[in-house]
Image (tube, helix red, strand yellow):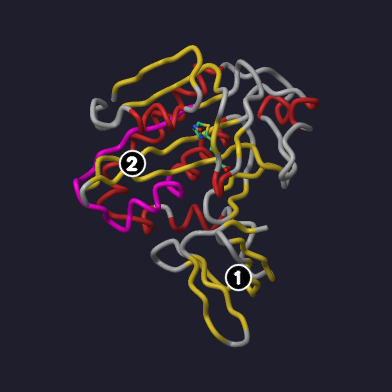
Amino acid sequence: MREIVLDEIDSTNSYAKNNIGELADKTVIHAMRQSSGRGRLNRIWLDLGLGNLFLSFVLKPSGTYKKVYANLTQYLCVCLSKVLEKYGVTSQIKWPNDVLVNDKKIAGILSEAIVSKSSLKGIVLGIGVNLNASKADLDKVKERHATSLNLEVNKSIDLNVFKKELLEEFFLDYDKFISQGFSLIESYYLSHNCFLHKNLQVQMFDKIETGYADRVNSDGELVLVKDKKELVITIGDIL
Ligand code: BTN
Protein backbone atom coordinates (compact mmCIF):
# COMPACT_ATOMS: atom_id res chain seq x y z
CA MET A 1 0.00 0.00 0.00
CA ARG A 2 1.17 3.54 -0.76
CA GLU A 3 -0.24 6.68 0.71
CA ILE A 4 -0.39 10.27 -0.51
CA VAL A 5 -1.39 12.83 2.10
CA LEU A 6 -2.57 16.24 0.89
CA ASP A 7 -3.33 19.34 2.95
CA GLU A 8 -6.26 20.36 0.79
CA ILE A 9 -7.77 19.25 -2.49
CA ASP A 10 -11.07 19.74 -4.30
CA SER A 11 -11.93 16.05 -4.02
CA THR A 12 -9.75 13.01 -3.29
CA ASN A 13 -11.81 11.06 -5.84
CA SER A 14 -11.18 13.72 -8.51
CA TYR A 15 -7.46 13.81 -7.67
CA ALA A 16 -7.27 10.03 -8.02
CA LYS A 17 -9.24 10.07 -11.28
CA ASN A 18 -7.13 12.86 -12.78
CA ASN A 19 -3.90 11.04 -11.91
CA ILE A 20 -5.07 7.48 -12.45
CA GLY A 21 -2.34 6.70 -15.00
CA GLU A 22 0.47 7.52 -12.58
CA LEU A 23 -1.01 6.01 -9.42
CA ALA A 24 -0.13 2.44 -8.48
CA ASP A 25 -2.63 -0.19 -7.43
CA LYS A 26 -3.55 0.12 -3.71
CA THR A 27 -2.58 3.77 -3.40
CA VAL A 28 -4.52 5.74 -0.81
CA ILE A 29 -5.18 9.46 -1.24
CA HIS A 30 -5.90 11.21 2.04
CA ALA A 31 -6.76 14.91 2.26
CA MET A 32 -7.02 16.94 5.46
CA ARG A 33 -9.51 19.31 3.85
CA GLN A 34 -11.73 18.85 0.83
CA SER A 35 -13.27 21.87 -0.87
CA SER A 36 -15.59 20.18 -3.42
CA GLY A 37 -16.33 16.71 -2.12
CA ARG A 38 -18.67 14.72 -4.32
CA GLY A 39 -21.36 12.25 -3.28
CA ARG A 40 -23.58 9.73 -4.96
CA LEU A 41 -26.37 10.79 -7.34
CA ASN A 42 -24.67 14.14 -7.99
CA ARG A 43 -24.82 15.23 -4.37
CA ILE A 44 -22.09 17.19 -2.64
CA TRP A 45 -20.13 15.94 0.36
CA LEU A 46 -19.53 18.75 2.81
CA ASP A 47 -16.19 19.25 4.52
CA LEU A 48 -17.08 19.44 8.22
CA GLY A 49 -13.61 20.59 9.22
CA LEU A 50 -10.19 19.28 10.17
CA GLY A 51 -10.27 15.94 11.95
CA ASN A 52 -12.83 14.35 9.63
CA LEU A 53 -11.76 11.69 7.14
CA PHE A 54 -11.62 12.23 3.36
CA LEU A 55 -9.92 9.37 1.62
CA SER A 56 -9.87 7.51 -1.71
CA PHE A 57 -8.49 4.09 -2.56
CA VAL A 58 -6.99 3.64 -6.02
CA LEU A 59 -7.55 0.03 -7.03
CA LYS A 60 -6.37 -1.70 -10.18
CA PRO A 61 -7.44 -5.33 -9.79
CA SER A 62 -7.52 -6.04 -13.56
CA GLY A 63 -7.76 -4.36 -16.95
CA THR A 64 -11.33 -5.47 -17.57
CA TYR A 65 -14.40 -4.75 -15.47
CA LYS A 66 -15.80 -7.55 -13.31
CA LYS A 67 -19.15 -7.56 -11.56
CA VAL A 68 -17.54 -7.93 -8.14
CA TYR A 69 -16.03 -4.45 -8.43
CA ALA A 70 -19.51 -3.01 -7.98
CA ASN A 71 -19.59 -4.69 -4.56
CA LEU A 72 -16.50 -2.89 -3.29
CA THR A 73 -18.65 -0.19 -1.73
CA GLN A 74 -20.40 -2.91 0.28
CA TYR A 75 -17.05 -4.38 1.28
CA LEU A 76 -15.85 -0.97 2.45
CA CYS A 77 -19.02 -0.30 4.43
CA VAL A 78 -18.56 -3.63 6.25
CA CYS A 79 -14.92 -2.69 7.00
CA LEU A 80 -16.09 0.63 8.41
CA SER A 81 -18.78 -1.02 10.51
CA LYS A 82 -16.15 -3.38 11.99
CA VAL A 83 -13.86 -0.45 12.87
CA LEU A 84 -16.77 1.37 14.54
CA GLU A 85 -17.28 -1.74 16.69
CA LYS A 86 -13.79 -1.15 18.12
CA TYR A 87 -15.11 2.18 19.43
CA GLY A 88 -18.07 0.44 21.03
CA VAL A 89 -20.44 1.69 18.34
CA THR A 90 -22.92 -0.62 16.65
CA SER A 91 -23.90 0.48 13.17
CA GLN A 92 -26.59 -0.45 10.70
CA ILE A 93 -26.10 -0.91 6.98
CA LYS A 94 -28.57 0.60 4.56
CA TRP A 95 -28.33 -0.84 1.05
CA PRO A 96 -26.09 -0.50 -0.76
CA ASN A 97 -23.40 1.15 1.34
CA ASP A 98 -24.72 3.65 3.85
CA VAL A 99 -23.49 3.19 7.39
CA LEU A 100 -25.89 4.52 10.02
CA VAL A 101 -25.52 4.96 13.76
CA ASN A 102 -28.77 5.42 15.66
CA ASP A 103 -30.49 5.99 12.32
CA LYS A 104 -28.12 8.80 11.33
CA LYS A 105 -25.58 8.72 8.53
CA ILE A 106 -21.96 8.72 9.73
CA ALA A 107 -20.16 8.13 6.43
CA GLY A 108 -20.53 8.23 2.68
CA ILE A 109 -18.93 6.04 0.03
CA LEU A 110 -18.53 6.85 -3.66
CA SER A 111 -17.04 4.42 -6.18
CA GLU A 112 -16.04 5.44 -9.69
CA ALA A 113 -14.69 3.19 -12.43
CA ILE A 114 -12.33 4.85 -14.89
CA VAL A 115 -12.62 3.29 -18.32
CA SER A 116 -10.74 4.42 -21.39
CA LYS A 117 -10.63 2.80 -24.84
CA SER A 118 -12.71 -0.05 -23.42
CA SER A 119 -10.13 -0.96 -20.79
CA LEU A 120 -10.45 -0.41 -17.06
CA LYS A 121 -7.81 2.06 -15.87
CA GLY A 122 -8.79 1.72 -12.25
CA ILE A 123 -11.45 2.05 -9.60
CA VAL A 124 -11.54 5.00 -7.25
CA LEU A 125 -13.28 4.13 -4.01
CA GLY A 126 -13.81 7.21 -1.87
CA ILE A 127 -15.00 7.42 1.70
CA GLY A 128 -15.83 10.31 3.96
CA VAL A 129 -16.33 9.61 7.66
CA ASN A 130 -17.57 12.14 10.17
CA LEU A 131 -15.12 11.70 13.03
CA ASN A 132 -14.92 15.08 14.73
CA ALA A 133 -17.87 17.23 13.71
CA SER A 134 -19.88 19.60 15.85
CA LYS A 135 -23.67 19.43 16.14
CA ALA A 136 -23.86 22.81 14.39
CA ASP A 137 -21.76 21.51 11.47
CA LEU A 138 -23.95 18.45 11.12
CA ASP A 139 -27.01 20.66 10.80
CA LYS A 140 -25.49 21.94 7.55
CA VAL A 141 -25.99 18.49 6.03
CA LYS A 142 -29.33 18.90 4.36
CA GLU A 143 -30.20 15.55 2.76
CA ARG A 144 -30.67 13.46 5.89
CA HIS A 145 -29.85 13.27 9.59
CA ALA A 146 -26.14 12.94 10.12
CA THR A 147 -23.94 12.04 13.06
CA SER A 148 -20.25 11.94 13.88
CA LEU A 149 -18.21 9.41 15.86
CA ASN A 150 -17.04 11.95 18.47
CA LEU A 151 -20.66 12.71 19.34
CA GLU A 152 -21.54 9.01 19.62
CA VAL A 153 -18.69 8.26 22.03
CA ASN A 154 -18.43 11.68 23.70
CA LYS A 155 -14.75 12.19 23.03
CA SER A 156 -12.62 13.45 20.19
CA ILE A 157 -11.28 10.90 17.75
CA ASP A 158 -7.67 10.60 16.64
CA LEU A 159 -7.91 10.87 12.85
CA ASN A 160 -4.64 9.04 12.16
CA VAL A 161 -5.46 6.14 14.49
CA PHE A 162 -8.89 5.75 12.91
CA LYS A 163 -7.43 5.90 9.40
CA LYS A 164 -4.84 3.23 10.25
CA GLU A 165 -7.56 0.95 11.63
CA LEU A 166 -9.71 1.41 8.54
CA LEU A 167 -6.83 0.81 6.11
CA GLU A 168 -5.76 -2.32 8.00
CA GLU A 169 -9.30 -3.67 7.99
CA PHE A 170 -9.71 -2.90 4.28
CA PHE A 171 -6.48 -4.50 3.08
CA LEU A 172 -6.82 -7.51 5.40
CA ASP A 173 -9.30 -9.28 3.12
CA TYR A 174 -9.27 -7.13 -0.01
CA ASP A 175 -7.59 -9.71 -2.28
CA LYS A 176 -9.85 -12.44 -0.93
CA PHE A 177 -12.90 -10.26 -1.57
CA ILE A 178 -11.88 -9.66 -5.19
CA SER A 179 -11.73 -13.39 -5.81
CA GLN A 180 -14.65 -14.47 -3.62
CA GLY A 181 -17.07 -11.56 -3.98
CA PHE A 182 -20.13 -10.63 -1.95
CA SER A 183 -20.41 -14.06 -0.28
CA LEU A 184 -17.37 -13.17 1.85
CA ILE A 185 -19.26 -10.39 3.63
CA GLU A 186 -22.82 -11.58 3.17
CA SER A 187 -23.50 -12.75 6.72
CA TYR A 188 -22.03 -9.63 8.36
CA TYR A 189 -23.79 -7.38 5.85
CA LEU A 190 -27.18 -9.00 6.37
CA SER A 191 -26.90 -9.22 10.15
CA HIS A 192 -26.36 -5.44 10.26
CA ASN A 193 -29.02 -4.48 7.73
CA CYS A 194 -31.79 -2.03 8.56
CA PHE A 195 -33.74 -2.12 5.28
CA LEU A 196 -34.97 -5.65 4.65
CA HIS A 197 -38.61 -6.69 5.02
CA LYS A 198 -39.89 -3.14 4.79
CA ASN A 199 -41.74 -1.22 2.12
CA LEU A 200 -39.23 1.10 0.52
CA GLN A 201 -38.83 3.87 -1.98
CA VAL A 202 -35.63 3.57 -3.97
CA GLN A 203 -34.30 6.40 -6.04
CA MET A 204 -32.57 5.49 -9.25
CA PHE A 205 -31.12 8.32 -11.31
CA ASP A 206 -34.30 9.56 -12.94
CA LYS A 207 -37.04 7.59 -11.25
CA ILE A 208 -38.26 6.28 -7.93
CA GLU A 209 -39.29 2.63 -7.49
CA THR A 210 -41.40 1.43 -4.59
CA GLY A 211 -41.71 -2.09 -3.27
CA TYR A 212 -41.13 -4.58 -0.49
CA ALA A 213 -37.45 -5.21 0.27
CA ASP A 214 -37.48 -8.99 0.04
CA ARG A 215 -33.79 -9.87 0.02
CA VAL A 216 -30.27 -9.11 -1.12
CA ASN A 217 -29.20 -11.62 -3.76
CA SER A 218 -25.84 -13.35 -4.00
CA ASP A 219 -24.50 -10.46 -6.12
CA GLY A 220 -25.37 -7.93 -3.42
CA GLU A 221 -28.28 -6.51 -5.42
CA LEU A 222 -31.53 -5.47 -3.76
CA VAL A 223 -34.60 -7.50 -4.70
CA LEU A 224 -37.81 -5.52 -4.38
CA VAL A 225 -41.21 -7.16 -4.76
CA LYS A 226 -44.02 -5.14 -6.27
CA ASP A 227 -47.35 -6.53 -7.48
CA LYS A 228 -45.94 -10.06 -7.07
CA LYS A 229 -43.11 -9.23 -9.48
CA GLU A 230 -39.46 -9.08 -8.57
CA LEU A 231 -37.37 -6.07 -9.39
CA VAL A 232 -33.60 -6.45 -9.07
CA ILE A 233 -31.89 -3.16 -8.29
CA THR A 234 -28.18 -2.78 -8.91
CA ILE A 235 -27.74 0.96 -8.38
CA GLY A 236 -29.97 3.17 -6.28
CA ASP A 237 -30.50 4.97 -3.04
CA ILE A 238 -33.12 4.07 -0.44
CA LEU A 239 -35.09 7.18 0.44
C1 BTN B 1 -22.39 9.75 -0.52
O1 BTN B 1 -22.83 9.36 0.55
O2 BTN B 1 -23.12 10.33 -1.34
C2 BTN B 1 -20.95 9.50 -0.86
C3 BTN B 1 -20.03 10.53 -0.31
C4 BTN B 1 -18.57 10.23 -0.58
C5 BTN B 1 -17.64 11.28 0.01
C6 BTN B 1 -16.19 10.92 -0.11
S1 BTN B 1 -15.14 12.02 0.79
C7 BTN B 1 -13.72 11.37 0.02
C8 BTN B 1 -14.09 11.10 -1.43
N1 BTN B 1 -13.91 12.27 -2.25
C9 BTN B 1 -15.05 12.74 -2.74
O3 BTN B 1 -15.18 13.76 -3.45
N2 BTN B 1 -16.07 11.96 -2.34
C10 BTN B 1 -15.61 10.86 -1.51
Report the residue that reaches farthest toward the front. Answer: 117
Q: What residue is disc 1 on?
A: 213
Q: Residue at x 35, y 45 (%)?
A: 113
Taking 123 as reference, is 11 left or right? right
Image side of residue 178 versus residue 70, left or right: left
Cα distance in 3D space between marks 2 and 1: 29 Å
Q: Residue at x 55, y 31 (%)?
A: 37
Q: Nearer the viewer, mark 2 or mark 1?
A: 2
Give the amino acid type for the residue marked by disc 1 in the picture. Ala
Residue drawn at the location 75% of the way across and 42% of the way down: 145
| In magenta segment, residue 89 | no
Binning the other alpha carbons within 10 Å of mark 2 as few (below 14), some (14 to 19) or many (20 upward) gives: many
The residue segment tinted magenta is 55-75
Q: Residue at x 63, y 58 (%)?
A: 238
Q: Position of residue 200 (x, y in %)?
A: 67, 67
State the image coordinates of residue 21 (x, y, percent, origin top left).
24, 30
Which sits earlier in the primary sequence, circle 2 or circle 1? Answer: 2
Circle 2 is placed at which residue position?
123
**Relative to 208, does residue 26 appear above or below in the rendering?**
above
Q: Is residue 69 magenta?
A: yes
> Can you tell me whether the CB of the residue at mark 2 lies under 8 Å from the nearest atom of ligand 1?
no
Q: Residues within 10 Å of mark 1 (few under 14, many from 20)?
A: many
Vertical placement of 158 versus 230: above or below?
Answer: above
